[in-house]
Amino acid sequence: MRVEVDTDTCQGHNRCFTIAPELFDVDDFGTAVVIGDGSVPVELEDKARLAEANCPEFAIKIIE
Amino acid sequence: MTDIDDTHTDLYGPVTDWANDFDHAVPEYNERAHEIWAEFQATECPMARSERYSGLWAPFSHEFVHEIAYDTDHFTSQGVVVNTGRPMIEAPVGPAPPITSDPPFHNIARRLLLPPFAPKVIAEWEPEVRRLCNDLLDRMGDITDGESIVDGATQYAQSIPVNVIARMLGFPTEDEELFRGFVHDVLERINEPVEERMQFMGLLDAYLDEQITDHINNPRDDLTTYLMNVEIDGNKLSHEHVRGSIVLLLIAGIDTTWSAIGSSLWHLGTHPDDLSRLANDPEVMTFALEEFLRAYAPVTMARLVKEDHDFHGCPMKANDWVLLPFPAANRDPAQFERATEFVIDRQVNRHGAFGLGIHRCLGSNLARLELKVAIEEFVARFPSFTVDGDVTWSVGQIRGPRRLPLRVLATS
Ligand code: HEM
Ligand code: SF4
């Protein structure tokens, strides 16, 4: 599994960073960036799905 | 609000027909908001209209709110607080950038303010906010379990955001009462004649001019100095831009957060199961925080219609107001499961309490910090309490309790 953030749609609600700081970081403008290449270790797959399901702007994509 | 004179001229009077003569500034609206939204959400057309304020529309479905928030082509942010007049400073800058700005200027003004409100910068305020909350709790004096009544709104919630933003801006915290007065004027006295509104807006501008001059004479490291020095393409901001942004930070940060804290305490004081869950399982706060924000979102924004526009069959006219009730969208059964229930550990919660689209609340990290710490500290001190007495709610676009008598049942 991989996660992606659409930086044009992301408005920096920071929900992903709170839920899964192992997978997402935020830059100085509060915009989310994926950590590394966005690949998700098996034990973090639930957290990745939770982050996706809580993004108010539908900016996170999960690629399986 | 404690000492503020509430006798002012209301131009419109009570509402009997919510669908065709809508007005969110009558006291009944915020008192019965949840019922009113549910009624609209159950009908074919979740849109109210009104001739008040020279034309006003109010959509209550998540779908409509979302669509309007994203549609900056047909709707301008030049005015975001519905009132009897119309803003005089034109988009794209507007009177209080970036909230009153439209693209493309909006993004330029917004980017200036994003770094000081980024999550990691705001996180550093946590110890200060905790200390402030504990001070307020200490100041409540001797508490006798089962007997003492404290006011969760006036003795607690209302002081937290005012103090934090005054410190960030480098304004005297003794002026707390004054700030609350300004906020009340701008956000609650919306149905008064334009001349009266001009008068109190003038007082706010004069106060801020004084503070800005004081910063020129005594430079110090704070947000005001930052705004005075920051540049767009090598040019400093105009005095009006600096002052407008400060107005925005004062107004946007105070009533909103105070209302969120107050409503959350109201919920806990009326739902003992949720209170004991939070007191015994502090970890649930991660989810509870977002559920407080969803179920009791305090902020409804507004837009002006740019040009005559047919919105799903609603004939909107240029310069009509359109409300953006994010709080109603957050309780729309078409978007949320068990939408009208408070589910303390709700896992999937794509709420729009901080807005949707380009104007996402710039202060959301600070607001979350204040709300979380305020509730944590209150519950840690008083693990059991109940609402006991008359609660009064604010009027207008920001919804929250203004008097909240809580009987303390247990102190830790
Ligand atoms: C629980 C508390 C709060 C809530 C629910 C809230 C809600 C909102 C909402 C819904 C918007 C969107 C406005 C729009 O679409 O027109 C907004 C914008 C904004 N808020 Fe907040 N707010 C809160 C606290 C704060 C705080 C503490 C600050 C700063 C001190 C703040 C500063 C701002 C600013 C500067 C904007 C304008 C952003 C822009 O136009 O790009 N807010 N807020
Ligand atoms: S939750 Fe969505 S909008 Fe918020 S920072 Fe993450 S990706 Fe961006």
Image (tube, coloured by chain):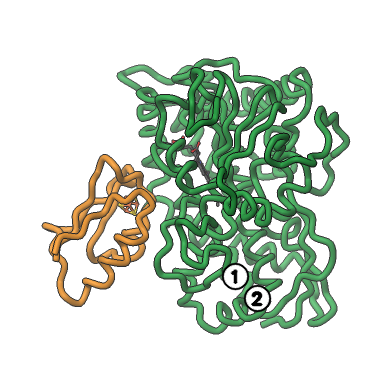
Chain colours: A orange, B green
Residue B359 at x, y = what percent?
Answer: 44, 37
Going by the numbered disc 1, the residue's amino acid type is Glu
B397 left or right of A1?
A: right
Instruction: Report, in whole angstroms, how far the alpha carbon at label 2 lies from the one at label 1.
Output: 6 Å
Total labels: the figure holds 2
Picture disc at residue B381: 2
Number of other residues with Cα within 10 Å of mark 1, as a class: few under 14, some 14 to 19, many 20 or more: some
Q: Chain of mark 1?
A: B
- For image coordinates 16% across by 67% down, the residue present is A40
| Image location (x, y in percent) of residue B258 | 64, 52
Measured as percent of width and height from the top left, residue A54 is found at: 37, 60
Name the mark on residue B163.
none
Quadrant of the snapshot with the C terminus of chain B: bottom right
Q: Nearer the viewer, residue B237 or B97?
A: B97
Seen in the image, is A20 located left or right of residue B149?
Answer: left
Q: Residue at x 51, y 19 (%)?
A: B308
**Mark 2, secondary structure of its residue:** helix
Q: Secondary structure at mark 1?
A: helix
Q: Residue furthest right?
A: B7
In this view, B244 is above or below B380: above
Can you identify the residue that label 1 sits on?
B377
